[in-house]
Amino acid sequence: MVMRIRGKIGKGRHKLKRNYRDKGKISLDKFFQEFKEGEAVALKACSAYQKGIYMMRFHGRTGKIVGKQGNCYYVGISDGSVKKKLLVHPIHLKRIKSI
C-alpha cells in the first residue's frame, strides 16, 4: 500500500486549533519579535500564517536559536539522537526560559 503524501500541515487540524481569544488578526508583536543566538524557544505554529512553518511532527518541541536567514531563524532541535536545524518564521516561535 502506498502512503499518502500530506505536505507540511498534514494531520494538523487539532494541533493548529487556536483559542477563541486568540482568533482573528495575527499579532504584530509576535510577527516582528527578535531572538538572539542561544535563546531557548518552543515551536508553536500559528495557523493564520503558513509561510515559514515547520513539519507538524516537530510541533511542541523545544530548541535553541542557531542562526538567522532573512526574517526567519534556524532552530536546532534533537530528533531522537539526530540533531536537526529547522528554518522557522518568528511568528511560530515562543520564547521560553531555558531547556
Image: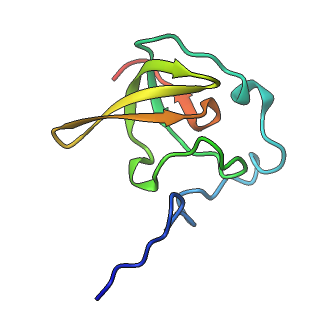
Identify the residue at horizontal 53%, vertical 25% (top origin).
Answer: 73
Q: Position of residue 28 (x, y in %)?
A: 79, 29
Q: Nearer the viewer, residue 70 or 42?
A: 70
- The vertical placement of 91 against 38, above or below, is below
Spot the residue most to the right. Answer: 25
- The vertical placement of 15 against 83, above or below, is below
Q: Position of residue 31 (x, y in %)?
A: 72, 30
- Asked whether, in this view, residue 51 is left or right of residue 98, the answer is right
Give the position of the N terminus as an image quadrant: bottom left
- The vertical placement of 59 against 4, above or below, is above
Label total for image: 0
Q: Which picture quadrant has residue 30?
A: top right
- Asked whether, in this view, residue 69 is left or right of residue 32, the answer is left
Identify the residue at horizontal 45%, vertical 11% (top origin).
Answer: 37
Q: Position of residue 85 (x, y in %)?
A: 37, 32
Give the position of the C terminus as an image quadrant: top left
Spot the residue most to the bottom. Answer: 1
| Display coloring | rainbow
Q: Which picture quadrant has residue 16?
A: bottom right
- Asked whether, in this view, residue 67 is left or right of residue 21, the answer is left
Identify the residue at horizontal 38%, vertical 19% (top origin).
Answer: 98
Q: Nearer the viewer, residue 91 or 20?
A: 91
Q: Position of residue 52 (x, y in %)?
A: 60, 41
Q: Which picture quadrant has residue 79?
A: top left
Q: Nearer the viewer, residue 42 or 1?
A: 1
Identify the residue at horizontal 53%, vertical 35% (top origin).
Answer: 88
